[in-house]
Image (cartoon, rainbow, N blue to C red):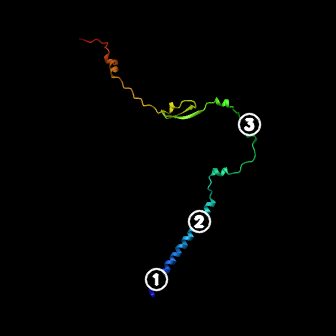
Amino acid sequence: MNNKIKDQLQQLKTQNTLVVILVLLFVSILIWTGVSIYSSTTTSQLPANIKKLTLPLNPSIDREILDSISQKVVLSGQQLESFPIYRLILDKRTNIEKVITIDMDETVFTQPAKNTPTPQPNLLDENQNSPTSTPSSQPTNL
């Protein structure tokens, strides 16, 4: 009987410890959730440039801006055709960016550079043109 009481007492201690652990876990979850909610409501998640865009617009119309827009020149289609259109391409031969007009042939610039061999000197030509092959101007004693 004494042994049975000890087993029940040990089981009650184990259950008591388990209840304390669960209560502490529940309290820590509540604190964590509260701190997360508080920090998310007090700090802004929007960047400064987006906050600036959310400001209300000024409802007044500036007459000077409207006048400057009305004074701008409008070009006809024929006038626009006379303007050149430029493109920026990479010259693969020199790895330099080039500005060309839209009607230029870009294949000249986009083809990789061809490796041309370095010419070898002709040894026969060098011997014929060397100073030792020309007759000397000093007389020789025989």
Disc assigned to residue 7 = 1
Measure how far apart labels 1 and 3 are at the Cα level. Answer: 97 Å
The three-letter amino acid code for the residue at tag 1 is Asp
In this view, the mark in front (2 or 1): 1
The residue under label 3 is: 70
Residue 57: x and y in percent read 71, 49
The earlier-in-sequence mark between 2 and 3 is: 2
Q: Residue at point 54% right, 35% down?
A: 89
Q: Quadrant of residue 37?
A: bottom right
Check if mark 2's residue and mark 3's residue have beta carbons within 8 Å: no
- Element on which disc 1 rests: helix
Residue 124 vertical placement versus 7 (above, below): above
The three-letter amino acid code for the residue at tag 2 is Thr
- 78 or 48: nearer the eye? 78
Q: Residue at point 61% right, 60% down?
A: 40
The earlier-in-sequence mark between 2 and 1 is: 1
Q: Quadrant of the N terminus?
A: bottom left
Check if mark 2's residue and mark 1's residue have beta carbons within 8 Å: no
Residue 105: x and y in percent read 54, 30
Residue 23: x and y in percent read 55, 73
Residue 43 vertical placement versus 112 (above, below): below
Measure how far apart labels 2 and 3 are at the Cα level. Answer: 59 Å
- In screen coordinates, is 1 left or right of 66? left
Disc assigned to residue 33 = 2
Residue 2: x and y in percent read 45, 87
